[in-house]
Amino acid sequence: MRAFAAALAIVVACRVLSPVLAEDTTLPKPLARAHAHNDYEHARPLLDALDRGFCSVEADIYLVDGKLLVAHNRRDVKPERTLEALYLDPLLAKVKANGGRVYRNGPPFTLLVDIKANGEATYAELAKTLARYAEMLTVVRDGKLRAGAVTVVISGDRPREKVVADAVRYVGIDGRMSDLDDKQSSNLSSDLMPLVSDSWYTHFKWRGKGKMPDDERQKLRAFVDKAHTKNLRVRFWATPETVKLWRELDAAGVDLINTDDLEGLARYLNKNP
C-alpha cells in the first residue's frame, strides 16, 4: 500500500511540475547580445525572439485611451495589443517558471520600450503599469539599485527630467552617442542611462558589403570603448542585415546587435559564440 501511495505521489508531482519542466526544455541557449528590433512585427511577438534565445526585444508604444498599445504607427494600434499582453505578462510567466530568470540560469533580459509620442503622459502611465510587475524588474529606489530579471529601458520621446525625479524608478534611459561627450549627460549614472543607441547611417557610410574601411572600423571601436569606460552598453539601429556587418559589430564589442532577421542573427551568434 505504501509503495502504491509513493508511486501515486510521484505521478501527481510530475503532472504538477510538467509545465515548469516543459518551460525549461523549450527555451534555447540565451544569446546575450541579440536584440529584436521592432519585435512586435513578428508573427509571435516576444515568443519568436525567445525561441531563438534573444535577450533583448523592442516594443514601440502609444498611449491611447489610458492603454499602452504596441505598434509602429498610431494608425496601426489595436486595443488587444497592449504592452502587458504582448510583453509584461508573458515575461513574468517565464520568470516565475524559470527560477527568477527569463532563461533559467541565464543573463538579464532587456525590454526596450520606444515611446513614440506624448512622452510625459505615456511615461506616467508606463511607470504605474511597471509598478505592478516590480517583482521581476530592475528597480532603483531612493538611489539604491535592485537588479531584476528584466531591465526596462525607454527610448524615443524620453521625458528625462521626469525619470530623474522619480524616487522609485522602474526604467533606465536610452542615451545617444552625443551623450558620451555632453557634460550633463555624462554625469548620469549607468543605472539611469544603461544604454546608448544611435542610427548606423548617421555615423557610418559602410553598408556591410565588401571590406569595412579602416577609418570607420576605428571610429566604431572608439565609440564602443568610450561607452564601456562609462559602464554603458551600446546598440546601433538601422544596421544593414549582413553577416559581415554583424562580424564587425561583434569584434568591436557592440553589446546589443540589432536585427529584424531573428533566424539569421541567431544562426550567426550560435556559430560564433
Image: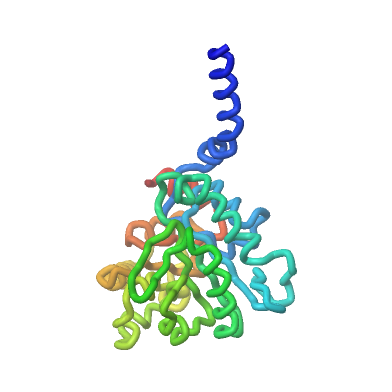
Q: How many tags in the picture?
A: 0
Give the quadrant of residue 144.
Answer: bottom left
**Is 177 or 146 nearer to us in this picture?**
146
Whether 17 is drawn above or below 123: the answer is above
Residue found 74% across the figure and 69% down from its top: 79
The colour scheme used to paint the residues is rainbow
Q: Position of residue 63 (x, y in %)?
A: 65, 78
Q: Is residue 4 visible?
A: yes
Q: Position of residue 237 (x, y in %)?
A: 49, 69
**Is 9 or 25 nearer to us in this picture?**
9
Q: Quadrant of the N terminus?
A: top right
Give the quadrant of residue 64.
Answer: bottom right
Q: Position of residue 195 (x, y in %)?
A: 40, 70
Whether 216 is drawn above or below 17: the answer is below
Residue found 30% across the figure and 83% down from its top: 181
Residue found 55% across the figure and 24% down from its top: 10
Q: Is residue 219 visible?
A: no
**Is 94 or 208 nearer to us in this picture?**
94
Q: Residue furthest left?
A: 229
Give the quadrant of residue 173.
Answer: bottom left
Instruction: Give the left or right position of residue 119, taking residue 252 as reference.
Output: right
